[in-house]
Image: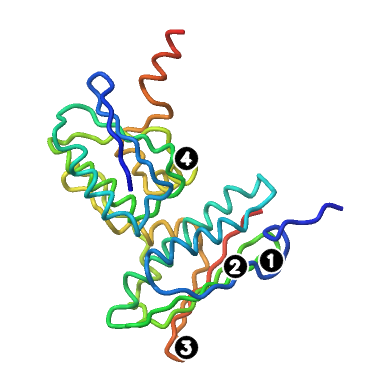
Amino acid sequence: MMAATPCCADGPLLRRRFRGTSEEVRSQLRAVEALGCADPTETEGMDDVLIVLAEVLNNIVEHAFTGVPDGWIECRISRLNGAISIETWDNGTPLPPGLLSMGSMPDIATDVADLPESGFGWFIVHSLTDDMMYERANGHNRLSFSLQIA
Amino acid sequence: MQITREKRGDILALTLQVQRLDAAGALAFKEQMRSAVADHDGRILLDMEQVGFLDSSGLGALVASMKMLGQGRRLELARCGAIVTKVLKLTRMDTVFVMHDRLPWAAAGQDAA
């Protein structure tokens, strides 16, 4: 039997805590990319994981740390039964109510001059995952979601 | 961030020489695009071949770049990779930009061969 690559085995894959900046989000995504995966049929699924994770983490950076001097995010990634589960913790301000239910696409049937330059993020998230959960616990935000990749 | 410029007939061909167009680089990209497109009235094509990752901030920066062109001109994107293409299709922005699988002048060369 061939040895499974780390990405393809069930269990925890990555747990990192980092400062809440867009540069650190980029480093986190590189670390997830570096997990790799030997099975080419899972490449598209892992691409989706990276796409969703980028939006979730950048959203935390943009909205949770106003007035929070030492913002951090902890990201825990694990694999079970062909799905990647992701949990994020941060010490930012609570998510605005209703954010999780918003997933509508901005109107793009307009002249070029009126095209939206933002508002795509949560639409992308909700397009690729449907089990996003949010809770506020002990002054921290926790988001969890999963994507089937195999 | 680095954008190189080259004239290909009436097309201004820009090559984006970064691996990621994301929240960390969106502002610098927009600033560089503003000067890169400033003195060209014709078609503008951005070669995305080296860009392996795009997030919604990067997508917003591409939209902002297209608006810089003015007169309703559409930014043309060439050789988008898997993740870039996925993000554009999910948001249906692949219908807003002019998409090219290949560099148009290379494709023409192949057709002629």
Q: Secondary structure at mark 3?
A: strand
Q: Which residue is mark 3?
A: A137
Cα distance in 3D space between marks 2 and 1:
8 Å
The answer to whether residue A4 is left or right of residue B72 is right
Instruction: Give the residue at x 22% y 21%.
Output: B10
Q: Position of residue A78 (x, y in %)?
A: 63, 68
Q: Residues within 10 Å of mark 4 (few under 14, many from 20)?
A: some
- Number of the label disc, if any, that sits on residue A85: 2
Question: Up-down: is B3 above or below A46?
Answer: above
Q: What's under tag 2, amino acid-wise?
A: Ser
User: Residue A56's quadrant in the figure?
Assistant: bottom left
Question: Up-down: is B100 above or below A122?
Answer: above
Q: What's under tag 1, amino acid-wise?
A: Leu
Q: What's under tag 4, amino acid-wise?
A: Gly
B58 or A110, nearer to the observer:
B58
Label 1 is found on which chain of the structure? A
- Name the residue furthest top: B113
Q: Are marks 3 and 2 on the same chain?
A: yes
Q: Nearer the viewer, mark 3 or mark 4?
A: 4
Question: Up-down: is A31 above or below A110?
Answer: below
- Number of the label disc, if any, that sits on residue A80: 1
Q: What's under tag 3, amino acid-wise?
A: Ala
- Name the residue furthest right: A1
Cα distance in 3D space between marks 3 and 2:
19 Å
Q: Secondary structure at mark 4?
A: loop
- Number of the label disc, if any, that sits on residue B81: 4
Q: Tell me which label, 3 or 1, sits earlier in the chain.
A: 1
Cα distance in 3D space between marks 2 and 4:
25 Å
Q: Secondary structure at mark 2?
A: strand
